[in-house]
Amino acid sequence: MELQELPRTPSDIDAPTRERVARAILELGPSTAAVLADHLDLTTAAVRRHLDHMCADGMLEAREPRVYGARGRGRPARVFAITDAGRDHFDQQYDDLAVAALRFLAETGGDGAVVEFARRRVAGIEEHFHRAVADEPGLEPSEALARALTQGGYAASVRQGPVGEQLCQQHCPVSHVAHAFPQLCEAETEMFSRLLGRHVQRLATIAHGDGVCTTCIPRTISTSTRDHAQERLTS
């Protein structure tokens, strides 16, 4: 007797598109339905339908947008952000196993073994960085780093901050593991400083409950400014 394929439910059919919507929010950060529709080349109505479904499932949450300066007429469009449950759906199915393995490594090899593992884990990001710089020599180092991180699953971008640039990682595939083993975050920060040639400072991390991993990349002091400051000190 030949088995017949069971009919697919609307939820089964919509799953790939909902996956795309969720991935877009991971890449772009909290976004409106209109922004997501433009990014995914879908209608706003279609995107809203998926957003409503994922909010009902607890994967997304709707937020009031931050408004800077004078607010215009009308209520601003809501933005949608990934919840902790939504993050759990992406790339974190093996957290328990990873944490257990690192605990075993710490018990048998000590903290130094965990640190060495963390440093080796980010080696792939460094390779992506050097490749991006080689392929596009005029690329800003911070942008090259953001591209390398995105290739590694971190959905990174660079924004201008009050004292320099801010490297924002909308997603962290090891956030739950890094919560138990902060050496993973520390190794990333060391790598950022090494590749960018300056001290950077972590302002927030997903591993510690923040919505985005944010790293401050301070502006470099120009040679003329540095020389002028030195003259004032010696005069």
Image (tube, grey):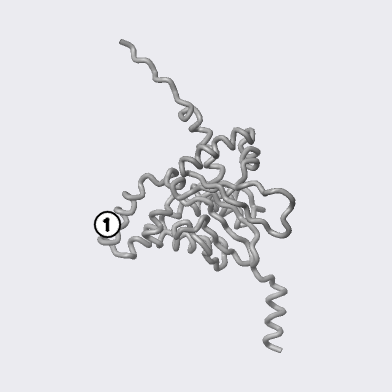
Residue 227 falls left or right of residue 92: right
The residue under the point 37% across, 57% down is 117
Q: Is residue 212 left or right of residue 118?
A: right
Q: Is residue 181 visible?
A: yes
Q: Residues within 10 Å of mark 1 (few under 14, many from 20)?
A: few
x, y percent for residue 176: 40, 54
Compared with 209, 15 (above or below) is above
**Residue name at image x 54 percent, y 52 percent:** 129
Nearest to the observer: residue 195 or residue 219: 219
Determine which quarter of the picture holds residue 89: top left
Instruction: Look at 71% across and 83% down and name the residue there.
Output: 231
- From this viewpoint, which residue is outermost toward the top? 1
Name the residue beneath numbered marker 1: 104
Say which residue appears at 50% left-offset and 40% top-offset: 54
**Could you tell me which quadrant the N terminus lies in?**
top left
Relative depth, front residue between 14 and 64: 64
